[in-house]
Image (spheres, helix red, strand yellow):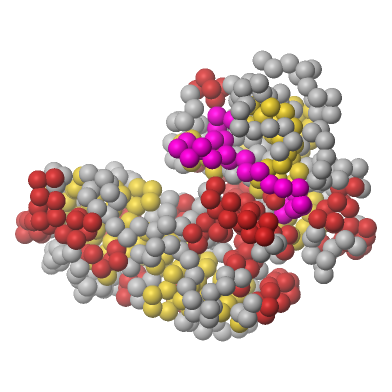
Amino acid sequence: MPDPTDRQPAIPATQHAIQFTGPGQLVHNRAKAVHVPGPTQLLLRVEAVGICFSDTKLLHAFTGHLRKAEVTTGLTPAELAGIPSYVPGDLPTVPGHEVAARIVEIGAAVTRHAVGERVLVQTDYRHLLTPGSNAAFGYNFEGGLQEYVLLDERMIIEPGTGERFLIPVGEDPSGSAVALLEPWACVEASYACRERGTLAPGGRLLVVADAGHEVDGLMPLLAAASPASVVVACAGDPQRAEVEAALEAALGSAAPVLRAIAGPDGLAPQSFDDIVYFGADPARIEHLQDLLATRGVIDLVLGGASVGRPVAIDVGRIHYDLLRWVGTPGGDASEGYRLAPADGELRAGDRVAVIGAAGPMGFMHVIRTVTCGLPGVSLTAVDIDDARLAQLGGIAGPVASSRGVHAVFLNARTAQIEPGFDYVGVMVPAPPIVAQAVELASPGARINIFAGFAAGTRAPLDLDAVIGGHLYLFGTSGSGIPDMQVVLHKLERGDLDTNLSVDAVTGMEGVRDALAAVEARTSGGKIVVYPQLHELGMVRLSELPDRLPTVAAQLHDGRWTRAAEEALLAAAGDAPGRRTAG
């Protein structure tokens, strides 16, 4: 084991840290050990951390969170056992995944990282799988709500690309600006997401046909992307023969063997990459969605029939498992897949609504919309809190005006929101809001379910309106290295100031209050934690003139700046930026 006495004198043996120790249990540990890097490991000194709504979900779920589970692939059990910051299951963890940091120590076998590098932390380890998800920084690996955090180089190099999960950044941006690149990257990912307009190549296909529904449109789907297996549950032999004929016409001798079953009720959950359903039975639709695997697509071919009632759609799996719903009022299955766009991006002339616009993530979607640069885009920002809407309008309104974007800020409790939107962003994890988004959408609209609904959360949706209106429902979770790089480049070019979204700052003692504010949605923006400030409680920027006037003097039009950050840390004798390795 590494010798804790063999290290730079400026690095202490213990530190302040926030730990989740069980469901709803938070501890401010004032003497947590600072891990000493092993040969393949490195130690980061944390500059700043953003609080995320996802942190509150981990606090409540703890071992029930899919990303708190044990890693099953990517690293061996022996390798994992040698990483002291690997804390799966019921082991206490340190949350915090929106992080700016600096490398201060490395092991002898570290080759891709160097002491002194300032980095943005990419947190989503999709190459390290858990039984139901993947590993992540701030979940089953300790995160940034501590003064120092240890990582292993073997877990932070992306297989295949060789890209680093610690992305180098320059010295100019504040720690807060760097830390908040992570949530801005999640927003970017929701627009850059690549959507699938074909069957999954080499995937598992289920075809279900009710009595009275013809099977049509499979041949072009099969010809465009061949599945590895096909299961058919048809009401009659003629329908099954139509599936067989489509397979033969599209793939000939290369067609996979078709397995016919009496019905889909006995099939295992999450078994299929694609489900094509010729029918309109709402109860059957509700059952079929449970059979979709991660990134699965269900195509509802109504054949002129109507579903007839709202259907309980798992909107949590749209967000976290990237499930997609397509369909057609007619009888041609290929029409449904053709509705899928290439990505989730805005289009020229889009009339955009952001519901929950005055929250931290809604703010970011608003700013991205008004700075997208597409001609003819307009914005309606919707919330239910006048004070937060005024705060949002005070920042985003001038930005929109400078870009020639028409923007209005409306309280849904006091103003009538008229339908006709081409793009609707859902920021509030309340099922009725998704149903409202469907009502507000114009034909051909895209509905971005960005709110972090827990998997299993079902919203009653009018699928006749969704399918008849050619609406596309999608959602994303997290971000990738390319998304991080996109927003980093925007920050470096001056096209994006992530500090626009800062609403409050705090030290370690205020983290509990910060999490409560995020969960209660009383914060109008992001809350930034400075771990080196041990006893500072949460302070909103609007409170700074009374509580910390020397810091308030460095704000710019009431907004957070690097100079304000330096003033805050100077009060504790620790200015950011060009500092020593300690």
**Residue 55 coordinates in the image, percent (x, y):** 63, 47
Say left or right for 1 vs 431: right
Front one among 195 and 442: 195
Tally of numbered tags = 0
Say left or right for 549 vs 159: right
Position of the N terminus, as image quadrant, is top right
Say left or right for 95 vs 330: right
Q: Residue 155 colored magenta?
A: yes
Position of the C terminus, as image quadrant, is top right
User: Does 234 appear above or below 512?
Assistant: below
Q: Residue 26 colored magenta?
A: no
Front one among 221 and 385: 221
User: Does 7 appear above or below 561?
Assistant: above
- Evaluate whether residue 263 shows in this view: yes
- Tell me what residue is drawn at x 58 percent, y 40 percent: 165
Say left or right for 188 vs 30: left
- Evaluate whether residue 412 shows in this view: no
**Residue 52 coordinates in the image, percent (x, y):** 64, 52
- Tell me what residue is drawn at x 62 percent, y 43 percent: 167
**Residue 132 coordinates in the image, percent (x, y):** 44, 40
**Residue 93 coordinates in the image, percent (x, y):** 64, 35
- Tell me what residue is drawn at x 53 percent, y 63 percent: 430
Write down the region rendered in magenta: 153-177
